């Protein structure tokens, strides 16, 4: 049974599952522009706040054609080779589980493609292994709006907690007087949609 404390993402790790061009082609639950925006915003937030992050691909190298991570993700972690798999459930790959355990975190924030396949299977397996799982619905995508929604419902019923990228960012860095919070300004200005105007207002009123 979850307690109030476990329903926060403090001291969590991020798992970005299969954000690849070919995998993204059939996604129809979210526009390509919004998916790219939200995934990169989430990733940049994790990078800025030094949140341990596990990157995966499916058939990225083992298939007949290369299917790397989104270019923006590769640019954030240029020296990191994502864990490549052939099984849709990342939790079935010992290398993935080992990477998650190496973070030392028991709370996992997950986003991935497709919501109803790789993300849902991995999230539910992680829950079964005793981890608290939070999935970022707007940094994930399914083959149709219904497929995405049904997968979200399934994960919620299994015990995962739904979030959005901005909610994750706000909870990872809640103190707006902290130095690390200032690192969020460029991300919000670039990816925050209407929230960027609030940031512009704040910056305009800062001394100096």
Image (cartoon, rainbow, N blue to C red):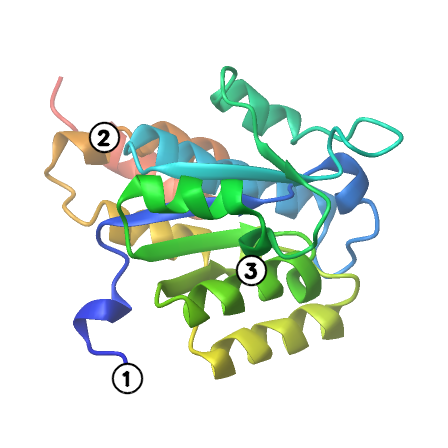
Residue 90 x, y percent position in the rendering: 59, 51
Question: Helix or strand or loop: what does disc 1 sit on?
Answer: loop
User: Mark 3 highlights which residue?
Assistant: 122
Q: How far apart are marks 2 and 3 (CA)?
A: 33 Å
Quadrant placement of the N terminus: bottom left
Judge depth for marks 1 and 2 and give the one in front: 1
Report the front residue among 203 and 183: 183
Do we see residue 128 in this rendering? yes
- Residue occupied by mark 1: 1
Mark 1 Cα-neighbour bin, 10 Å: few <14, some 14–19, many ≥20: few
Q: Quadrant of the C terminus?
A: top left
Q: Mark 2 points at which residue?
A: 182
Judged from the image, the secondary structure of the residue bearing numbered disc 3 is helix
| Side of 184 where 83 appears, left or right | right
Q: Can residue 161 be seen in this view?
A: no
Q: Quadrant of residue 104?
A: top left
Camera-near label (2 vs 3) is 3
The picture places residue 33, in percent across and down from the top left corner, at 68, 42
Q: Residues within 10 Å of mark 2 (few under 14, many from 20)?
A: some
Mark 1–mark 3 Cα distance, whole angstroms, equals 20 Å
Q: Which quarter of the figure has residue 24? A: top right
**Where is residue 93 shown, x and y percent of the image?**
58, 48
């Amino acid at each position: 049974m979850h307690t109030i404390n476990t329903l926060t993402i403090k001291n969590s790790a991020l798992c970005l599952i299969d954000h690849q061009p070919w995998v993204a082609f059939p996604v129809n639950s979210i526009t390509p522009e919004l998916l790219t925006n939200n995934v990169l915003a989430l990733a940049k937030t994790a990078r800025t706040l030094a949140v341990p992050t596990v990157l995966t691909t499916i058939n990225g190298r083992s298939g007949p054609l290369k299917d790397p991570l989104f270019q923006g993700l590769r640019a954030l972690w240029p020296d990191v080779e994502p864990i490549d798999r052939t099984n849709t459930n990342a939790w079935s790959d010992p290398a993935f589980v080992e990477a998650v355990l190496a973070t030392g975190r028991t709370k996992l924030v997950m986003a991935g493609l497709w919501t109803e396949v790789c993300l849902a299977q991995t999230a539910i397996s992680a829950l079964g292994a005793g981890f608290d799982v939070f999935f970022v619905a707007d940094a994930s995508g399914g083959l149709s709006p219904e497929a995405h929604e049904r997968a979200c419902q399934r994960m919620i019923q299994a015990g995962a907690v739904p979030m959005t990228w901005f909610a994750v960012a706000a909870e990872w860095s809640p103190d707006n007087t902290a130095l690390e919070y200032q690192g969020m300004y460029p991300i919000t200005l670039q990816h925050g949609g209407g929230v960027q105007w609030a940031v512009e207002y704040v910056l305009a009123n800062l001394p100096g």
